Amino acid sequence: MKVSGRVAVIGVGTMGEAIVRGLKRRKLVASSRLRGTVRTQTRAKELNETLGIRIGTDNAEAVRTADVVVFCLKPQNVVRTIQTLARSRCFAHQPLLISIAAGVTSREIEEAVGAPCPVIRAMPNTPCAIARGTTVISRGKSARASHVRTAHAIFDPLGLTLELEEKHFNTVTGLSGSGPAFGYLMIESLADGGVMMGLPRAVATLLAART
């Protein structure tokens, strides 16, 4: 399923970049309809060249022209950013809003927006950066089935996408969201054991990762 309309990714960091690359790889959104924002002009210029889409520093401009807005911001920043955009009436056209901020509920997003925008909360994990991850999504009170399908189209290129009730998100954060870190720790420990037994570090890490 292609994503109709224009998509803005607010905060093109690790996960935001993975989303952009996934959309482009699957040709779900034309580059001319895909844009993102970062904090600095220097970083914007770098990403313009590497991603081949329009990257800027003006969140308001990006949101006003988007039909789907994906907030890839840290939890402590997302509500404040949305409130700032709401005061500038950036959500008057009621775009679909998707947030990946851990611990920030769809209700908090809806209250910050102050307009009846459809909201989808998402929890991707770090393997999504290499298209081998899992994303759990949950719809807010104004989101419909069509909005869920759009969220699937955005996150499916990154791995598996599941829809669950939002009451499960704390568990999801601990299991799927944080779980990969424990897997990395296990791999590192196995590799350390291999090194102690005389294997080169690169070989030990490769064997541990593929065990």
Image (spheres, grey):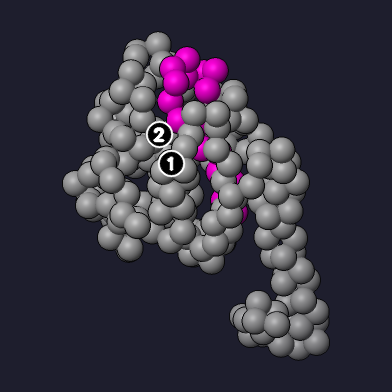
Numbered disc 2: secondary structure: strand
Q: In the rendered view, would you say 13 is above or below 37?
A: below
Q: Position of residue 55 (x, y in %)?
A: 28, 40
Extreme-top residue of the structure: 87
Visible residue check, residue 164: yes
For mark 2, what is the residue?
Answer: 96
Q: Residue at x 69, y 65 (%)?
A: 184
- Earlier sequence position, callout 2 versus callout 1: 2
Q: Residue at x 66, y 34 (%)?
A: 103
Q: Is residue 18 left or right of residue 127?
A: left
Visible residue check, residue 205: no
Q: Position of residue 58 (x, y in %)?
A: 30, 27
For mark 1, what is the residue?
Answer: 147
**Front residue of this view, candidates 192 and 112:** 112
Extreme-front residue of the structure: 145
Q: Position of residue 209 (x, y in %)?
A: 65, 77
Tally of marks: 2
Crowd class of label 1 (few under 14; some 14 to 19; many from 20; radius 10 Å): some
Quadrant (top left, top right, bottom left, bottom right) of the C terminus = bottom right
- Which range of residues does the magenta coloring cover? 110-126
Quadrant (top left, top right, bottom left, bottom right) of the N terminus = bottom left
Crowd class of label 2 (few under 14; some 14 to 19; many from 20; radius 10 Å): many
Q: In the rendered view, would you say 110 is above or below 195?
A: above
Q: Position of residue 78 (x, y in %)?
A: 52, 28
Q: Residue at x 52, y 23 (%)?
A: 110
Disc 2 residue type (three-letter):
Leu
